[in-house]
Amino acid sequence: MECAIYQEQTGTCEEIDCRQEDGGCQATLDRLAQLQKDEFAWIRLDAPRQDELERLGPYLNLHPLAIEDAVQAHQRPKQERFGDVLAVAVKTLWFIQQTADVETGEVMIFLGPSFALTVRHGAADPAAEAASRLAQQPEMTRLGPVSVLHAVTDVIVDAYADAAAQVRTDLTQLERCVFSPARDDVTEQIYSLKREVVEFRDAVGPLVPVLHPFTTAREDWPRKILPYFRDVADHLTRTDTEVRALDDLLTSVLDAHLAKVGTWQNDDMRRISAWAAILAIPTLVAGIYGMNFAHMPELDWRYGYPCALAIMATGAGLLYRAFRRNGWL
């Protein structure tokens, strides 16, 4: 558990030493009970246990359903009101370059009149970067707990844009493989990347309607925060459009690759058929003269054997030339 107390008028931050006692942070609880009117607390938890959140619940007026959502995770992006507490669920994303995988996590953000609570699940920690940004922008903390919501969502949406750029780089490499003269089968790589993009789209798309209401005036929020949320929403919409375009482009690349694989198979079948036809002529002649009948043409002729070989070679050569001219060989 990490906790910081922000003074709205001065924008200063007081970090609390959170010593764990009986599954909770007694120093944080004591400080929460002493918050002044112009102060707000930001508590940051990493995959907390049920009892930890239940201990914070009475101090932050957290609804039992909100605590359940925060502990279990696996929520779709959403916003929900529990009395005077706003709960926002957001998916986090990060791209693993070595495996071309898009990994997901989750952050639950709770906003009350005098606190912000972030609960993280997964390896990505947007709260740490958000705290660093707020430390460099004390004028933002003067806007109250809503500044935490903006800072965290801004970091997450920036990570979306970075991941989308990396996915596009991998897609460009796959396109080059698909349309290169080499016969590399990249079906598995294309399908794997498409699966990651679908997971990406499921995280970004549902967040668009969640953030959109934050761009309009709200009675309990300072109007100065609205342009910042509009900027985040604009970046999110742009990333959502790009992810959808990547998904469509991957579908087209997969179709093109499968068509190319079908062409390779047709080429192979034509070559096999052409060589079978070429070999059929000597096989036919040899088969006829191998039947061992007593009365067959040219059996007693001195040049019968060379003539048969010449007929085989000439027929095979003519067919080979015809197949080469038609592009079968």
Image (cartoon, rainbow, N blue to C red):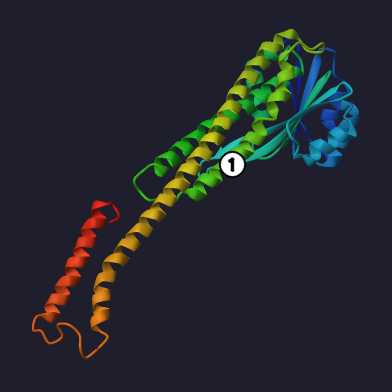
**3 to the left or right of 309:** right
Nearest to the observer: residue 145 or residue 298: 298
In the picture shown, does residue 103 fall above or below 329?
above
Q: Residues within 10 Å of mark 1 (few under 14, many from 20)?
A: some
Q: Picture coordinates of residue 218 (x, y %)? A: 79, 12
Residue at 58% of width from left, 31% of height from top? 244
Q: How many marks?
A: 1
Examine the rendered structure and indicate whether residue 144 appears above or below residue 170: above
Which residue reaches farthest left? 302
Left or right of 111, for residue 240: left
Q: Which residue does the image show at 26% across and 57% down from the upper left?
A: 323
Q: Is residue 319 visible?
A: yes
**Residue 147 percent across, percent down from the top left:** 72, 18
State the residue at coordinates (35%, 48%).
182
Judging by the rendered image, the residue that carries numbered circle 1 is 196
Horizontal and vertical percent position of residue 27 = 83, 30
Q: Secondary structure at mark 1?
A: helix
Q: Quadrant of residue 90?
A: top right
The amino acid type of the residue labelled 1 equals Glu
Rendering quarter of residue 39: top right
Q: Is residue 125 visible?
A: no
Q: Quadrant of the C terminus?
A: bottom left
Quadrant showing the N terminus = top right
The residue sitting at the right extreme is 58
Residue 78 is left or right of residue 307, and the answer is right
155 and 259: which is toward the camera = 259
Vertical placement of residue 140 versus 273, above or below: above
Q: Relative to 81, is 12 above or below?
A: above
Residue 249 or 276: which is nearer the viewer?
A: 276
